[in-house]
């Protein structure tokens, strides 16, 4: 447990100091300094991300709409009300991978040139729908999260696109009282461009830890591969293949596997105002 927590802490701290500090897991075009009145985002990640869960195709979709209540420092600090909805399904039928989770609350956001840090509190309802009625729960959620992206693919001069996200807190009503920490880091190299499409060899690492010792929450997954990425404005998508190795800290087991994936994300700003 201590080893996993130290690894997660190291990734978060190194990322913060390296770049100046939902998860949209991709480098996007331009700055995220645009604190606006009705910002929103959605993303979808699909593929085989866990070598430990052999041949399991996982699909995650997330949607969030915010409303700015207050902003200052030329819109680089804001208070927003948010409403979000996430769905997760898989082909193997694991209870933790088949759920819907609507949430709402407030966030305090600090915007940087390449990313955002948010502190949030609210209420969330989680339904793990392939189990019985006892698999449903609602509870208060509290968490801190960040996202940073650098050298965005949309910039034709960028050669080293990368991104990182992390979250720590109580954000699963079904795992009530469980402090969960997750972090992700990826770094790529643009090998060649074909118009708006970039061919990118990449490396990645995903870290997870929790206080209750749940096996699927305590892990390290790392590997490398190649992907084709398309970025235009606030739209980003990629698809690719990689080789991964996964360690489960609690059980002490490990596995290797091939990752096939396709991702999509989009951000919008309705009736907004921009600042720096």
Image (spheres, grey):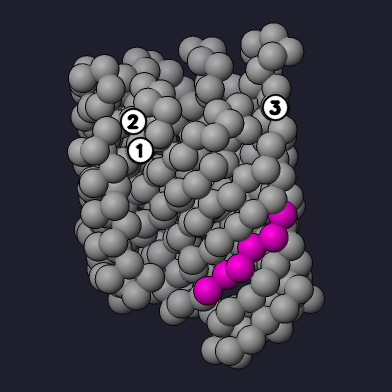
Please identify the residue farthest to the right as the structure is shown. 271
**Mark sitting earlier along the chain (1/2):** 1
Q: Earlier in the sequence, mark 2 or mark 3?
A: 3
Disc 1 to disc 2: CB gap under 8 Å: yes
The mark found on residue 218 in the picture is 2
Q: For the point 37% across and 26% down, which residue is it?
A: 213
Reading the image, the residue beneath label 1 is: 208
Main secondary-structure element of the magenta-colored stretch: strand
- What quarter of the picture does the C terminus occupy? bottom right
Instruction: Give the total of numbered labels.
Output: 3
Determine if residue 192 is in view: no
| Residue at x 41%, y 54% (from the top left corner) | 165
Q: Nearer the viewer, mark 3 or mark 1?
A: 3
Q: Camera-side residue: 112 or 203?
A: 112
State the residue at coordinates (36%, 57%): 164
Mark 2 Cα within 10 Å, few/some/many (few <14, many 20+)? many
Image quadrant holding the N terminus, namely: top left
| Residue 72 % position (x, y) | 64, 86
Q: Position of residue 114 (x, y in %)?
A: 42, 73
| Disc ID at residue 137 | 3
SS at badge 1: strand
192 vs 50: above or below: below
Q: Depth check: 232 or 59 in front? A: 59
Mark 3 or 1, nearer chain start: 3
Q: Residues within 10 Å of mark 3 (few under 14, many from 20)?
A: some
């Amino acid at each position: 447990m201590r080893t996993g927590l130290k690894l997660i802490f190291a990734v978060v701290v190194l990322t913060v100091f390296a770049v100046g500090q939902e998860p949209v897991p991709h480098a996007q075009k331009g700055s995220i300094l645009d604190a606006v009145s009705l910002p929103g985002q959605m993303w979808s990640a699909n593929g085989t991300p866990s070598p430990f869960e052999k041949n399991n195709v996982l699909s995650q979709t997330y949607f969030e709409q915010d409303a700015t209540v207050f902003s200052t420092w030329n819109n680089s600090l804001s208070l927003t009300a948010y409403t979000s909805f996430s769905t997760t399904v898989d082909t193997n039928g694991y209870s933790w991978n088949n759920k819907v989770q609507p949430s709402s609350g407030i966030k305090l956001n600090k915007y940087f040139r390449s990313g955002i840090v948010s502190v949030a509190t609210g209420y969330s309802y989680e339904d793990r729908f392939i189990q019985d009625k006892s698999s449903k729960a609602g509870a208060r959620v509290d968490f801190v999260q960040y996202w940073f992206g650098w050298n965005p693919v949309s910039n034709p001069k960028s050669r080293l696109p990368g991104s990182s996200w992390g979250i720590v807190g109580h954000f699963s009503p079904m795992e009530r009282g469980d402090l969960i920490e997750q972090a992700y880091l990826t770094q790529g190299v643009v090998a060649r461009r074909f118009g708006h499409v970039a061919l990118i060899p990449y490396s990645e690492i995903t870290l997870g830890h929790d206080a209750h010792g749940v096996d699927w929450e305590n892990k390290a997954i790392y590997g490398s591969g190649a992907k084709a990425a398309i970025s235009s404005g606030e739209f980003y998508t990629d698809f690719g293949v990689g080789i991964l190795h996964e360690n489960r800290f609690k059980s002490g087991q490990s596995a290797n596997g091939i990752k096939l994936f396709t991702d999509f994300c989009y951000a919008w700003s309705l009736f907004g105002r921009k600042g720096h």
